[in-house]
């Protein structure tokens, strides 16, 4: 009888084991089906290495037409897998992206066909140059991407630490290609000249870095003269007055005022310019116009005595210093929870007048602003304005004029009457562009995006990061050997012995 019971027990154990296997297979099938129907990715890396930037996501969300991407790269290329993973992130955000992988080594015929289709048309060229590794196309329009556009690694042998800088170059190039090909024309930011403003050509006070940052989003900066002109060209989606050192003439200010009243968009970045006797700061000719628009640009110098906001070694109470006070406005909404500062230097206070204007950024409570141009700042108690001090204001101006004439080059549609005034022009300088630990570039792009109603520009662009090599000493190697080769196998042996001993009992 005992033998029959043992046999029956073994049969039940086999039956339960079989059912468990069937249930596990069914569970695995259901999990795979759910993961297929509800695909989701998580990125738990410190710098979100496997997540598209907010700006790329905003561009893809607006993509409403098929977009083809040809990758002309061998699968054996060291950068192929990383590029493929990046493209897959794009495909999870939109169904409009069609990707074609063409391996020049395995399929030379297909490569030759694609190369001839998108040939540059230059004399003596039968196809694409050899350094072109990708082609983006929308309909009949296309844009080629070279290896340097997608892959950039730099090594600095002079550094004490061995580091490899990994850039967001590939994402910026791909997103820029999408914007370039899907827009009917580039957005044009016209920049005034002739008053000592920041230059587009280069130099110490240059907008070259800013121009490079926004060019990938199909925004072009164009220098224009307002002296002697009767109106701002209609091709200007926005007008910028960036750090003038001498006053604009009244006639020029009237042209700008009429431009804004007629529906144009205006960015003004001012600096405190001392007068000749160093007793105060001069008027730059635009203050009365800005007051009419609801913005008060004080002739002051802002002081930030909070030591926590002064960069090590180069920080000074009048600049450069960090600004972390964000207002309630669409332009600065992405930066409130980002935890990165804005860097300004030699700023003047800019304050809102009325309900239409809104402060964008402001200094700490310990800060203040004063109107004397002496080298030694006065105390906070003696200052005319006490912190937090508003440094930038955005407002909407009522449109009272008419649309441009029909014979103008381009008509402004759907945008108008938007004004941003910043009390610091240095934040737009090239030296602050491309720095991953500050938001100057992103904020500058967001301002342009809000003025021209380019929503994607208001979103955060991907930031550069640094990856450190893993360097192991002999002691580290010995410890790793002990853990991997000795301790872990012993743990499995002990676990197996414990299971065997438990079954004996």
Image (cartoon, grey):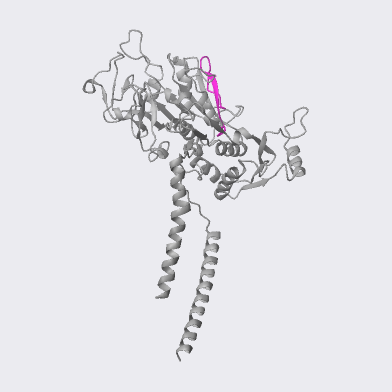
**Segment colored magenta:** 216-235
x and y percentages locating residue 192 in the rendered image: 50, 20
Is the magenta region chiefly helix, strand or loop? loop
**Furthest-top residue in view?**
277
Say if 462 sits above or below 225 in the image. below
Residue 498 location in percent, x, y?
41, 67
Question: x, y percentage for residue 280?
Answer: 32, 13
Is 210 part of what is drawn in magenta? no
Q: Position of residue 122 (x, y in %)?
A: 74, 28
Q: Is residue 29 above or below residue 201?
A: below
Q: Is residue 186 above or below residue 299?
A: below
Whether residue 425 is visible to the viewer of this picture, yes or no, is no
User: Toward the viewer: 436 or 374?
Assistant: 436
Q: Nearer the viewer, residue 479 or 400?
A: 479
Q: Viewer-proximal residue, 353 or 34? A: 34
Residue 28 makes an appearance in the image: yes
- Which image quarter holds the C terminus? bottom left
For image coordinates 68% across by 38% down, the residue present is: 141
Viewer-proximal residue among 225 and 374 = 374
The residue at the point 70 percent across, 34 percent down is 130
**Would residue 230 be counted in the magenta stretch?**
yes
View extreme (left): residue: 381
How many circles with numbers are drawn on the protein? Answer: 0
């Amino acid at each position: 009888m005992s033998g029959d019971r043992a046999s029956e027990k073994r049969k039940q154990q086999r039956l339960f084991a079989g059912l468990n296997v069937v249930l596990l297979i069914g569970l695995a099938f259901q999990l795979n089906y759910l993961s297929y129907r509800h695909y989701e990715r998580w990125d738990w890396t410190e710098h979100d290495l496997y997540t598209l930037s907010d700006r790329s996501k905003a561009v893809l969300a607006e993509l409403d037409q098929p977009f083809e991407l040809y990758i002309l790269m061998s699968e054996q290329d060291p950068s192929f897998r990383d590029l493929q993973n990046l493209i897959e992130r794009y495909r999870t955000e939109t169904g409009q992206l069609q990707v074609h992988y063409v391996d020049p080594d395995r399929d030379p015929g297909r490569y030759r066909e694609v190369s001839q289709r998108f040939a540059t048309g230059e004399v003596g060229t039968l196809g694409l140059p050899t350094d072109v590794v990708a082609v983006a196309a929308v309909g009949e329009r296309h844009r080629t991407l070279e290896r340097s556009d997608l892959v950039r690694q730099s090594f600095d042998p002079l550094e004490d630490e061995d580091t490899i800088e990994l850039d967001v170059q590939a994402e910026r190039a791909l997103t820029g290609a999408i914007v370039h090909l899907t827009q009917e024309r580039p957005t044009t930011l016209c920049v005034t000249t002739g008053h000592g403003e920041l230059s587009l050509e280069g130099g110490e006070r240059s907008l070259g870095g800013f121009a490079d940052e926004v060019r990938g989003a199909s925004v072009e900066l164009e220098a224009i003269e307002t002296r002697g002109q009767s109106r701002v060209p209609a091709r200007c989606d926005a007008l910028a007055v960036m750090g003038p050192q001498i006053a604009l003439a009244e006639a020029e200010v009237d042209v700008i005022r009429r431009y804004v009243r007629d529906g144009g968009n205006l960015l003004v970045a001012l600096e405190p310019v001392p007068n000749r006797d160093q007793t105060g700061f001069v008027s730059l000719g635009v203050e009365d116009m800005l007051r009419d628009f609801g913005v008060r640009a004080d002739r002051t110098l802002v002081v930030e005595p909070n030591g926590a906001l002064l960069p090590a070694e180069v920080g000074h109470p009048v600049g450069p210093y960090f600004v972390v006070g964000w207002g309630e406005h669409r332009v600065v909404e992405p930066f409130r929870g980002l935890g990165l500062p804005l860097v300004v230097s030699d700023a003047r206070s800019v304050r809102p007048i009325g309900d239409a204007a809104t402060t964008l950024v402001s200094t700490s409570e310990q800060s203040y602003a004063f109107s004397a141009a002496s080298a030694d700042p006065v105390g906070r108690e003696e200052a005319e304005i006490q912190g937090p001090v508003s440094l930038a204001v955005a407002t909407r101006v009522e449109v009272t004029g008419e649309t441009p004439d029909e014979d103008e080059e381009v008509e402004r549609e759907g945008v108008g009457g938007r004004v941003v005034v910043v009390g610091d022009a240095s934040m737009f300088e090239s030296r602050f562009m491309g720095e991953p630990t500050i938001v100057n570039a992103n904020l500058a792009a967001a301002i342009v995006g809000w003025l021209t109603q380019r929503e994607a520009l208001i979103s955060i662009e991907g930031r550069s990061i640094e990856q450190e090599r893993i360097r192991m000493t002999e002691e580290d190697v010995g410890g790793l050997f002990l853990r991997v080769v000795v301790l872990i196998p012993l743990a499995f042996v002990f676990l197996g012995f414990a299971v065997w001993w438990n079954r004996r009992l």
